[in-house]
Image (spheres, rainbow, N blue to C red):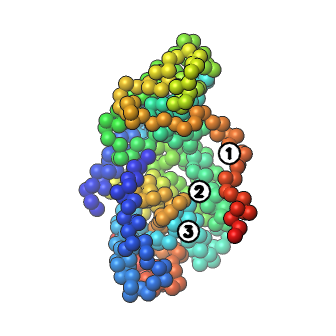
Amino acid sequence: MKLNAATEMIPITWPAFSDIHPFAPVEQAQGYVELLGELEAALCRITGYDAVSLQPNAGSQGELAGLLAISRYHASRGDQERNVCLIPDSAHGTNAASAVMAGMRVVVVATDDAGNVDLVDLRNKATEHSGELAAAMVTYPSTHGVFEEGIGELSRIVHDNGGQLYVDGANLNALVGVAKPGWFGGDVSHLNLHKTFCIPHGGGGPGVGPVAARSHLAPFLPGHRFSPRDSGAADRHHR
Amino acid sequence: MGDALVEATATAILSANYVARRIQEHFPVLYSGAAGLVAHECILDLRGITRETGVTAEDVAKRLIDYGFHAPTLSFPVAGTLMVEPTESESLAELDRFCEAMTLISSEIGRVADGTWPRDDNPLCNAPHTAEVIGGDTWDHPYPRRVAGWPMDAPPHGPAKYWPPVGRIDGGYGDRNLVCSCPPVDELAH
């Protein structure tokens, strides 16, 4: 388990970080604006995505936000019937729970003998639900602790059938600086930064479970109506 | 991107593969990639050992407390296994200490398998051992107190040894029988 040392926790107790009112006028929060902007840009560089929302307070919330972004993207294109989410049976239970909360129907994909997503089963299920496929959710590297070599093929199958690929960022610790979900097929990911870096666990807060996406999903990421910097999430492109 | 972040990633992956390679002769690694490598975590498959000896993944997890370790993830994502995710946080010395503990636990399992210790009274099924139990006036187990409480002759088994406040609990029962520890509403009323 990642060692989240006290020295890394202490700064969040500093008044300069913790005492600002959430609705302080933006001109009094310029330091925050800069800090959040830098963090978003860094997370875009790490993940290969185009936009980041720091609104979710935990990875689970990031999952829900990412799946809702997919739903709204489909709806914006008149594809309201796309509500099937393919999830491998090796997935963390949160994946299926988030999909159901986002109004999706979960279809389970089998695992092969080597612990990988069974691509034959994935192709069958994706084809069977081609007209209603919203997304597939996968973790990379997998919860079985393997860099699945079929990830590229998996991405093609999902996209060919009209779905979006949700890459669960739980194992980003094995990717930072080496591979980017936005480059190997992912459309959206949440990041569990207590596992990637050393922030506090979101469950008890203060935490953040950023959700990052490619540009076509960016307009559907959570923002805040009172925040000028969040008024047009789609404009926040960083590469 | 900073070189240090790349190094952290590489170290996390190297650490998991180091542990997997060192432990696999005692505990089979369930999954690996085509090149025989794991990512940043590995699943140790206890299910065969459980079938043969009755020693479970939970027994090993609890026994690790006696050795001074917080157990790895138990029974996720595969029931009856342990998932080890060392990350880049642990030093080589700590990884070695963990591998050594797992090796010793494997030999303890061997003593259950060969009948030296009964299946229902051994350091594994009785783990973790509290200070109260080890320091009690009576001791009627087939292994010495020292084996129970100080199974490894390496730090931190001196004054810094971690002592669990309770012995084995029935986790399944606890999950199904919730007890609210909040004070009653009356006490909160002004």
Which residue bears the numbered disc 3? A65
Query: In the displayed structure, does residue A199 sit left or right of residue A161?
Result: left
> Amino acid under label 3?
Ala
In this rendering, the label closer to the viewer, 2 or 1: 1
Query: In the displayed structure, does residue B89 sit left or right of residue B188?
Result: left
- Disc 3: CA contacts within 10 A as few (<14), some (14-19) or many (>=20): many
Callouts 3 and 2 in the same chain: yes
A5 or A213: nearer the viewer = A5
Secondary structure under tag 1 reads helix
Please give the name of the residue rendered at 48% of the width and 35% of the height, measured from the top-left corner: B163
Which residue bears the numbered disc 2? A95
Estimate the spatial distance between the alpha carbons at disc 1 and disc 3, rounded to whole Å. Answer: 29 Å
Secondary structure under tag 2 reads helix
Query: Where the C terminus of chain A falls, by quadrant?
Result: bottom left
> Amino acid under label 2?
Asn
Callouts 2 and 1 in the same chain: no
The reply to whether residue B21 is visible in this rendering is: no
Which residue bears the numbered disc 1? B175
- Quarter of the rendering containing residue A8: bottom left
Query: In the displayed structure, does residue B1 sit left or right of residue A162?
Result: left
Q: Chain of mark 1?
A: B
Q: Position of residue B180 (x, y in %)?
A: 69, 53
